[in-house]
Structures are given as C-alpha cells and as structure tokens.
Amino acid sequence: MSAVKGVLNWADARTGAGKPLRIAMNKVFPDHWSFMLGEIALYSFIILLLSGTYLTLFFVPSSTEVIYNGSYIPLKGVKMTEAYASALDISFDVRGGLLMRQIHHWAALFFIAAMMIHLLRIFFTGAFRKPREVNWLIGLVLLVLGIVEGFAGYSLPDDLLSGTGIRITEGIILATPVLGTWMSSLVFGGEFPGVDFIPRLYTIHILLIPGLILALITAHMLLVVLHKHTQFPGIGRTNKNVVGFPLMPVYIAKAGGFFFIVFGITVFISGLITINPIWLFGPYVPNAVTAGSQPDFYMGFLDGAVRIMPGWESTIFGYTLSWNLIVPAMILPGIVLGVVGSYPWLEAWASGDKREHHLLDRPRNAPTRTALGVAFMGFYGILWMSAGNDLMAIAFGLSINSITQISRVLVFVLPVLLFFITKRIALSLQRRDRDKLLHGIETGQIIRLPHGEFIELHAPISEEEKAVILSKVDIQPLPKPELVDANGVRRKGAWKLIAQAKVSNFFYGDNIPKPTLAEIEAAEAHMKHGLEHDSVHTETSALPSSTNH
Amino acid sequence: MKFPSIKRRHPVAAFFVMLAALGVTTAIYAAFDSPQVQAAVTSDAQIAAGKALFAEGCASCHGLNAEGTTDGPSLIGVGAAAVDFQVSSGRMPMATQSIQAPRKAPVYDEAEIAALAAYVASLAPGPSIPTADMVDYSDADVALGGELFRANCAQCHNFAGQGGALTQGKYAPELHSATALQIYEAMITGPQNMPVFSDETLSVEQKQAVIAYIMEMRNADNPGGLDLGKFGPVTEGLFAWTGGLGLLIAAAIWIGVKAK
Amino acid sequence: MRELDSHTSNPNRPPLAPIPHELRRTDVDARAAKRAERQVAAMFGMSAVMAILFMVSFALVDPKLRIGLPVIGTTYLLNVLMGVTFGLSIFLIGAGAIHWAKKLMPDSEVVEERHELATSDEEKVLLSETFNAGVQESGIGQLPLVRRSLLGALALFPIPAIFMLRDLGPGPGDTKFNTMWTEGTRLVRDVTYEPIKADEIPIGTLINAVPEGLEELEHETGNLNARAKAVIIVIRISPDEIVSQQGGTPDEPWDYNGVLAYSKVCTHVGCPISLYEQRTHHLLCPCHQSTYDMADSGRVIFGPASRRMPQLAITVDSEGYLIARGDFAEPIGPSFWEVRK
C-alpha cells in the first residue's frame, strides 16, 4: 500500500493531478442505456486499435505478384498480390489470425453502426443544442472518418470485392470535372490498378486516419467532461444539475465493465460468425467480378444513390460532365454533410433560443425536428436499400429494373410522407400528454352519477410522469419582423428577418402548449372531487387544444 | 454418326457440323454444339415413346413437331443435352408461363427423360448428353477451376455459386442443387439466358475443373463459423445491425436498469 | 448489512438527489447480498477458467481440425474454441463488474450542480485588455512592412508541400485513349490464353477474352494495368438479329459472321461486365445495373451508365483465328472530363 502511495505522491508532485483526480472521481453520470451508445463506438475503436496492430504484424501491403502456396487448397498455385496472399496466410496459417481478422472487421461494423445510432440519439433528444454544437460537428467528422477508414480497410486485402470497390472509386475520381484524370493518375501512381495504391492506402489506414480519429475522440470526450452529461427529464432533474452515479465507484465498474462486455461480445461473435470470407472471393483481377458486389453497409447509401441515378452526362465545350456520378457521389454527400453539420445552428437560428440546454427533449416535444429526422432516415434508408437491389430482387422474386424505378420515386416521396406522418404523431402525443396532466389516466372504473350519467373515474398521473411531461419547453415562433423603421424606411437586410420568421414558423408554428400551472391546479382540484367529473368536462372542453372524450 | 464423335477434336469436323447445324436450324433458342452429336445409343422405339410423351406434355408450348409456338421456343437442334438438363432439373415442363423456369422436382422419370431426349435429338443434330467420363471431375484442377469460375461464372452466379439477379426479374440460379451432369449440360446448351460455353470455348478438362470448384464450394467448411448465406457484405451488415448491435444494446439496457 | 447509502460513510460524495429511492433486495436481505457477492465472484472465476481454457486449446488443438456444429455447419474447432473462450473470458469480467455495481455498490443517485460555462464579464475585460496590450507591444499595427511580409510568407510556405505531391504519379497522358489492342492482335481466352477459332463459336456463346501477349506483358511490367483496359467479351449473335454496330462497311464489317467483340469495362465506373443474356442480348453490370444492348451497338438501355459499350472491330487471320482490326475507336471504361475530346 505504501508503495502505491509513494508512486502516487511522486506523480502528484510532478503534475498536481491530485485535486482534479478527486473531482473526476465524484463526476456524476446519469444512468440510461442510450447514453452508452457512444461508449460502444469508443470501445469498438479501442478493439480496432488492438486487433489492427496484431494484423499489421502479418499483413504485407504490397502489390507484388506471388504464387500462392499456403494451406487453402482451392487457391494453391494461383497468381495473386502479396497483400492478398498475406491476408490468406493470416486466415489459414496463423493460429488465431482468422479470429483477429473477424474481430477487426466485426468491430469496424459495430464502430460505425454505434456512431450512427449514437448520432440519432443525440439528434432526436436535442442534445446538440447549446453548448454542444461543436461536439456535434466533431462527432459528425468522426463518423465520416470512420466510414473512410472502414472503406480503406475493406480495400486492403485485395480480394475481388476489395478491388471492385477500388475500381468504382477510381471511376468516381475520374468523374471529377477538370481534374479527374490527373487525380486518378496521381492517386494510383499512373494507370489503374498499378502497384502503388495498396501501400499508400495502408499508410492512410493504419496511421493517418486512426491518428485523426484518436485526436478527435480526445477532443470529443474532453468536451463531454467540460459540458457534463445531459440527462432525461424526471423528478429532481433540472437544467442546472446532473443526477446519477459518481464515477468512483459505480461508473468505474459500469463503464469499465461495459468495455469488457463490448470486447467480449465482439470476440464471441467473431469466433462463431464469418465475416468477409476473402478466400471465397478470390484475388482481385480487373477482368472478373461477382454477382452481388456490395460495399460494407456504411457505404451502402452512396452505392445505392449511384445505382438509382439515371445515366445523365452532358458536354460543355466538348468536355464531359458525368452527372451520373457527380450528383450521387459528390453533390449528395456534400449536401448531406452540410445539412447535418449545420443543423444545430439552423435550429438555433429558427428558434432564436440562446439558452443552454442540458435537459433532453422528448422527441414528441420537438415535432418538426423529429419529423425532419425521420424523413432523413427514410431518404437514407431508400438509398441504403437500393445498394442491395440485386439481392432484394433474388430474395423476393422481383425485377431489379422495377425496384430501381420504384426507388427513384420513393427516395423523394417517402421522406415527405414520413415528415407529415411523424409530425402528426408527435403532436398527437403532445395532446395526450396535456390530457394526462389535466384529466389523469383512465382507471377503467365506471360509475353512475345520481342523475343517471355514466362516467369513468380518472386517476392523477404519478409525480415522475408529471415531471417528465412538464419538462416540455414551449418555443414560440419568432414574430413577423417590422420591415420599416420608425421613419418608415425599409430596413436593410429585411429579407433575412422574413426568412428567419418563416423558418421559425415552419419549426415552431405547430405546438400543443403545455398547460399553465393554474390550469393544472384547477384540474387536480377537480380530480380530487372525483364525482364532479361532469364539471371538469365542460371546463376543459372549452380549452382550444384539448380533445377526445 | 460415328465419324464425328471419334474425331471430334478435329477442327474440320467442327466446321462441318457447324455448317450442317446452321443449315438446319432457324431457332433462336438453339444452342449449337458441334462435336458430340448423338453419342448415346438410341432406338426407334425410344424415339417413338419420346414423341408420344412430347405430344402429351410439351407440344402445347413447343408445337406438335417441336417447331415452337408463341409460348415456347423451337426445340429443333437443341440436342439431347438440353432436354436432359431442362427436364431432369424439373424446369420443364413449366408449371405456369413465367419469365423464367424455376428448378423443381422432375415430372418425368429417367426412362421418360431419356425417351424425350432421344426424340428431340432425332429432329436435328445438337449437343448430346455428356458421358460419365466427361463429367468425372475427380482428377480436375480445383484452383484452375476457381480462376475459370471467377472469370466466366461468378459475375452471374456469385462468388460462391449462390446465384444472382439478371434484368427484368430473371435470375442466375444458385448452383448447389445441380448435379455435375446438369452443370455440364447447362454450359454446353446455354439454357434460358445463360450463354453457351461449348467444348471449344471451355474444354472438357476445363469444364471438369469448373465443376470441381463448384463441388468444392458446395462441400466447403466454414472456417470462420456461420457463413450468413455467402452473399457478401449485405448479410454481414444486416447481422451487425440486428444480432451484433442488438446484443450490445441489450447489455447497455441491462446496465441502465435499476436492480431490484 | 452494509450502510452503503448512508452519507456518513463517505463524506466527500456529492449530495443525494432528492428523489424517491427504493431499497434493493441486497440492501435489506443479507442473504441476497451474500448471493450477489458469490455470483460476482463466480463470474470473475469463470473468466479466469476461460482464459486458461483458451491457452490449453491454443496449445493442444490442431488448427486444421474440423467440427460439425448445429446451425453453423462444419467449421474449424480451434477458431470456435478461441472465440468462445477468449470472448467469454473478457465478457465475464465486464458482466461481473456490472453485476457488482448494480447489486452491491450504492444505488441512490447523487446530484452535481452545473455552472455556467461562459467566462465572467470582468474576466472577459481582463482578457481583452491583456490581448490588446500584447498586440500593442508586438507593434504589429505600427510595422506594416513586417506584417505584410509575414502574411506573404505564411501564405506561400505551405505551397512547396503541394508541389511535393506532384511525383505521386505521372500525368495521365493519352493512356485513357488507347489499349493494348492493335491491328492483327489475336484474341485469346481469358485465364487459358488459347486463341479463338471463329468457326468453333456457336450462337449464344460468351467468351471472356484478352489480347495475345498480355501474360508476357504483365510479367514484364509487374502490373495489371494493360489487362484493366484490354479485357473484352466475345459473343455470337445470329447475324439477322444484329440491329446495328458501331462501325464497319459491308466489305470490312466489325463483326465476323455474327461474332462481336465489345469492351468488358463498364462505361459507368469500370466494373468488368459479362452478365450476358444470350436470348435478349443484354449485358448487365452487377455493380450498378447499367444494361447494354449488344445487338444494337452496345447502347445503354437501363441504369446509370451514359456512354455505349465500345466495340472492338475484329476479323480472322489466315488460320481462322479471331484478330483485332485495331484499337477501340472510342475510350473504354468510365467517363472522364476529356473523354469526348
């Protein structure tokens, strides 16, 4: 014990970390499963670093041709690159190598899937609002880097699917206006496929991008510490506090334990379920391709967009613009990233709200945001599905042409439909919340009043539920701006204010206002009197937005 | 008919048979395969039996004399191999008119199939049923088969022979229900929309290698565990989102739930 | 029973949250607490056992030993054993720790106050004073020559780094406009490199082909660049079904008796395509479903491709083998800025 103390004293004398450490130990973490999604991503990244380091011990990132002579019989004697041969050796001639490859690949899928679902949680609960806008942006960049990193990893083993992916990438690079052929030539060190690409990609995959991801994760976590965690509404949970468990000891055990859980589950799955069986694909040769050439899921929406885009090209002064690639592979991701990245500022601009928000929104209480999110999921989902149109055609006995045509329509129609449906549902839920506050919940007990009327008894809702419902923040749309000043002169930049008011109305025009305290007290008083329900009836039905009964 | 089968490798033989075939047929669906014309022993009785079966089960679509109708292509010159492939794999007779005949349990027994094949083969020369020697792949080069498979077959039938989509609802079927003989027959006759890989395009040894590779895939172990259907990243992504992330989130929920 | 929730045991803990709190079984029942303790210990113990099992199987199990498992099928025993034992060994540490936290550590929630992040106004004044004083002292406002030359230097110094990227590769030159095909080059079958006798090709045939000499060239150059551009498909269509071709005269047709050669490289993003439907004469790309009509000049009839599939003019040599009449007349593969120049 004294030895430990000695070491700690030594370290403290050189860092002064004692006090910050004590404060960190008392840091409070709110308990909710959805707050662990980012941790899944973080832990998957650590698993990726560990398993990736192991793989580098055996992988040879080289396009030099060799004749395979390992223990996988169906490829014996086949010409292939050293990259592919070494990936086969890892799979068949290194004990535990196949397990490590599978751990690395499964962890990569979990890493990106967890980031996506973490992003959705942040979005739908409004956790990106002030002061967390920059962390939202960092998270988005992390997702993009994760996708690029995953794609680079998918391309390295130089199997048939890898090579097909690189081939498609080259096609997209070539479509870049003006610079395409030069960029392709520089990236590939000459013509496709060349021998330079795999070693270059390897450096990017094991050094550049992981370094960037690590740096950004550090920034992401520092900001989380600085901002303290958000929390869901409930009794005793306000915008000014965090309620939960201290790091020492509960969250050391829970969050630390969760790392082992994520790692353990990933290893377990990797021992039982195949991923990326490169030996079945064969080595990459530019003259072969397989039916069902798909990228990993995170590239799916781009691949799907490229699939359903009509074959438009145009020429300008004899030069070719390949809209069939520029639109789905350059403009589309640009717009998606731009809109998603700027969303926190867009919403703040529409609401005019400058307050800090640490208490999470329930999705129903931000109907336009929720509807926009669901509409985006529909848009993304159609593109994503389109990347599997050939497998869907097989699985459901459909025509690939019809699926493509239908997707071309759905990708525009479905988001609009989803927007309106979601918004209506959210508003209905708001109404129900209001109703619960004012009328309690139905008990199923029917009683007969002296004058013969039958009514159902209503019981007040629990304190916890009441606190949750009352957490709603009613935001009024910005008023129509004054377009002329006191002297009757039209103000400069009036159009900006008009636009802001319009967007604000789009976001906050529909809202079921939370009942006022007076209304709630009146309602509660009536509920206590139980049998006087008829009077509650008449009173509340006069309220503008109270429905049903 | 012995002459061409003895010297079937001879280029001149191939040329003559090709010319003869071109002269006889007007068929779209025809799959001319030069050399192995009529190797099997057939008798007039078998042909007659086949004609009777044909009139009963096939003529409504393919015409009384196999000349073809709007519902089915002419079978003149398709050869015994095509008949054996289509009928033994249950594709013919079709249950309903559809864009593509699916594989199903065969309707006719072996003798009936042989009779039908003999009858159709008697109409005009066409690829005959490969002999047992030709489909014997026991000594074939599996690795070469793999290379040929990836260059010629994988684009439609998928890297592991799991099948794939073609245009307008057509599809390349999975290969793991077919016998070695049926695979061979499919290559030389080009059933439905499959292109023809005659013995000149892909020699007998090369075909044996391809068959050996398909059989290797069929009986292959799954070194990494459950294979998720061998469809590539799509099913892996599905599992990652359902099984994988499902388990991880279940664990997260367990952590978040208060103990009783 | 341990009084974990009483504040006295840990005076430095953050204050308890003013919310209702229910006691757990382990808080009120000593036996339940003991049971939970044993469960946690069992998980940690099992984890250690699994780690040992891993090492034993690694050392003893033949890596090539197969095992038939339900659902999974035949697989490598060692891989399964390693995944399961190592996975459980790790998982059980986590499960034990969390079970411990949930059952035996304090479970009444505490509250931590938040504080405004923004700097106080006085501090902001100090900050801007400090900064402005610094600017003043540096003299950057009074020394325009220093300021401008510094800006110029800062703007220029990164540009050499961009220059250094120049030698990543040669310029594209005219590589996109020519392939290995020349007049008289024989067409040979892919993989086996055997020449193709024109008269041996039945209608409905598909042959994946490359130029003769490709193998040697690849050996020399050590790359697959020539292959990526030169791969073709050879098909035979009944001559009366050919609607149109991309060139040729009645005397010098681009086909040979219905034998047609087309590039195999999709004009969309370059996947090699040979999903050829011999009855419809359609060629479908498995990557993005571009579909070409090979009986009609290889024009695009569906999907995201825009340019038709380039045709290779062919004929036969004196021995009857297929040869090219020359290179492609238009660039093969994906479109690019200069493709129509």
Image (spheres, helix red, strand yellow):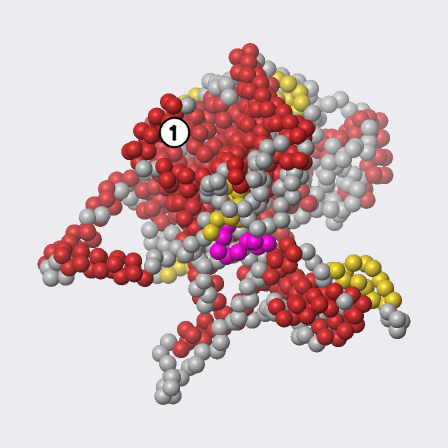
In the picture, measured across the screen, residue A290 lies left or right of residue C220, that is: right
Q: Mark 1 lies on which chain?
A: A
Q: What residue type is labelled 1?
A: Pro
Q: Nearer the viewer, residue A512 or A146?
A: A512
* Image coordinates for residue A324, horizontal then vertical, percent: 47, 54
Residue A197's place in the image compared with A340, above or below, is: above
Q: Name the residue under label 1.
A: A61
Q: Can residue A408 be seen in this view?
A: no
In the picture, measured across the screen, residue C230 lies left or right of residue A360, that is: left
* Image coordinates for residue A26, horizontal then vertical, percent: 46, 41
Q: Which region shows up in magenta?
A: A232-242
Q: Which of A432 and A350 is in front in this view?
A: A432
Splitting the image into 4 quarters, where does residue B73 fall?
top right
Q: Is residue C12 magenta-colored?
A: no
In the picture, measured across the screen, residue C63 lies left or right of residue A425, that is: left
* Image coordinates for residue C283, horizontal then vertical, percent: 56, 45
Quick one: quadrant of the N terminus of chain A?
Answer: top left
Residue C183's place in the image compared with A383, above or below, is: above
Q: Is residue A239 magenta-colored?
A: yes
Q: Which residue is drawn at 61% across and 69% down?
A: A516
* Image coordinates for residue A366, horizontal then vertical, percent: 56, 62
Q: Is mark 1 on a helix, strand or loop?
A: loop
Q: Residues within 10 Å of mark 1 (few under 14, many from 20)?
A: many
The chief SS type of the magenta part is: loop
Q: Which of B139 and B42 is in front in this view?
A: B139
Image label count: 1
